[in-house]
Image (spheres, rainbow, N blue to C red):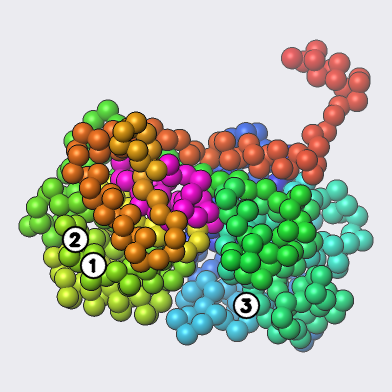
Amino acid sequence: MKIIFAASECVPFAKTGGLADVVGALPQALAQLGHSVSVYLPKYKQTKLTDAKVLLPSITIPFDDQYRFCSVLDGGKRSGVQFYFIEYPPFFGREALYGTPAGDYPDNAERFALYSRAVLEASKVLGVPDIFHCHDWQSALIPVLLRTSYADDPVFRSTRTVFTIHNIGYQGLFPPDTLPLLMLPWELFTIDQMEFWGKANFLKGGLVFSDHLTTVSRKYAQEIQTSEYGFGLEGVLRSRAGSLTGILNGVDYSEWSPDKDKFLARQYSPESLVGKKECKYDLLRQFGLEHAPIDTPVIGIVSRFVAQKGFDLIADIANDLARLPLIITALGSGDKEYQDMLLKLNRQYPDKIAVKVAYDNTLAHKIEAGADMFLMPSRYEPSGLNQMYSLRYGTVPIVRATGGLDDTIEPWDAGSAKGTGFKFSAYSGVALLNCIQEALRAFKDQTGWSRLILNGMKKDFSWTASAREYVRVYERLVPPKTLPPTEKVLEMSRA
C-alpha cells in the first residue's frame, strides 16, 4: 500500500511536541511492515538538509490576491521512508514554526493552505497514494480540498484520507473571509462543515471530510466525544463515532532505552540497575544539587509549562511540595505565568526545586534516567509519551487518569506487587498532593519499589503493534488488491 503522511513537524527535522515524534516513528514502522511510505513536511528555517535536490522547481498555488510559487525538495530516505519538503521561504523561513511568544503568525491559514495544496500537486508527479494520512489542523485542508476543489480530479479517484487528532485543543481558527482568500468555496462556511462560532475551523473541516478519524489513545477517543474534552467539537465527533478509532502512540526504543542511550552517564537494563544510581548522581550534578543525599527521592518533569499539563495544580500545592522529603527537577518552557512560578520556587527552595527553562534533549534523557519518579498531572493528555519513556527507564510515573496516561499506567498494589505507577482522578491540587505522598510512602519500601520498577521496564509500547492497527484502518478504506486467477497461478508458481 502507498501511504503519504502530511504533517507540520517531524523529528529530526522540526519539533515542538509529540506530533513530531509520532511522524518520525510511525512511518518507519509501516515501512518495516512492507508498505511504501512518504512524508511531506514544510521546509522551515530550522530544517537541516544536506545537498537537498530540487525535484519540482515550481508549483503554482492559487490565492485570491495572487499566485504563490513553491518548490519541492528531496529529503532522501531514512529507514525506508521517503521525505519531501515544501519550500517557500516567505512563509516557512521564520524563527519559529507557528508563531512568536506574542501569539500565532497572523498568516498561518495561508502558510498551511499553501503547504496542503503543494502536497496534493506534488503527489501527482511524485506518486499518488492509496492513503493520505493527515495530522492535526495544519494538514486538515487536504481532505477538505480532495472533497471540494479536487473532487472531479480522476487522479485521486481511488485515494482515501485518514486524519489523526493529536490534540483537539488546537484547531486552526480563522476569520470567515479566509475561505475565499484560500480559493475555497463559501459553501464550506456552514455549521455542518467548517463554520465554528463565526470562524472558519480547519480542524473541523478535517473531521467532517476525512474518510476515517483516529486519535492517539483509546481513552482520548472516548473523552473527546464529551463536552469536557471536546473543545466544542464533541457533536461532530459523536456523529462520526463509527469512523473514529483510538490507537495508542508507540515509543521509538532505538532512541528511548537505557541500555543504549548515548546521553546517559552510564547505561543500564532490568538485569543490572547499577547504572541508574549513577544516572541519579549525574542528574543532581546537572542541576547543581550534587550535595543532596542520594537516597532523597527525585521527581522529574519534562513538559510544556502550560495549564493543560497540570501546572495550575502544581502552583496550588507548591509550598506543600517544598515541605516534602523530595527534590523536583523540571525542564521545559511555555506560558510565562508558569515559567515565572517555577523560577520563583527555585529561588525560594534552591535545594528542593530545580528548574531549567529550555528545550534540551540531552537533559530530557538524563531526567528520564536519573529521576526516581516522573510527574504528569495533566488536565488532559491525548496520548503522552514521557510516561512510556519513564517505564522503560525504571522511573515510576505519577499521572492523572486521563487519555493515554490512563491507558498506559496501572496503579501500584503493594499487596500483589502488581502495577506500574500511581494515578489520581479528580483534577485538584489535593488529589495530586495525596498521590505524590502515596508514591513517597511506597518509595520507603525499597524491596517493593524494585519490583515496581521492574514491572514498568518489562512493558512494551513499541510502534509495531500500533502500526498494525493503522494498517487495519487503511485496509478497511482500501482493501488489499486481489490478483486475477491467472496471475494468482503465476504468483504461486514463482513461490
- The type of residue carrying mark 2 is Leu
Pick the residue in front: 393 or 490. Answer: 393
The magenta stretch is 382-410
Helix, strand or loop under label 3: helix
Q: Which residue is identified by label 1?
A: 320
> In x, y percent, where is residue 136?
63, 62
Residue at the top extreme of this rendering: 493
> In x, y percent, where is residue 38?
65, 49
Residue at 66%, 42% (x, y): give it: 470
Q: Which residue is identified by label 2?
A: 324
The mark nearer the N terminus, 1 or 3, is 3
- The type of residue carrying mark 1 is Asp
Would residue 340 appear left or right of 159 to someone viewing this image? Answer: left
> Is residue 93 something that shows in the picture?
yes
Residue at 38%, 38% (x, y): give it: 419
Q: Which residue is identified by label 3?
A: 108
Pick the residue in front: 285 or 3. Answer: 285
Is the C-beta separation of discs 2 and 1 under 8 Å?
A: yes
- The type of residue carrying mark 3 is Asn
Q: Could you tell me which quadrant the N terminus lies in?
A: top right
Would residue 368 appear left or right of 230 to someone viewing this image? Answer: left
The disc placed on residue 123 is: none
Residue 197, placed above or below residue 323: below
Kindly indicate the quadrant of the structure image that contains residue 2.
Answer: top right
Residue 109, placed above or below residue 30: below
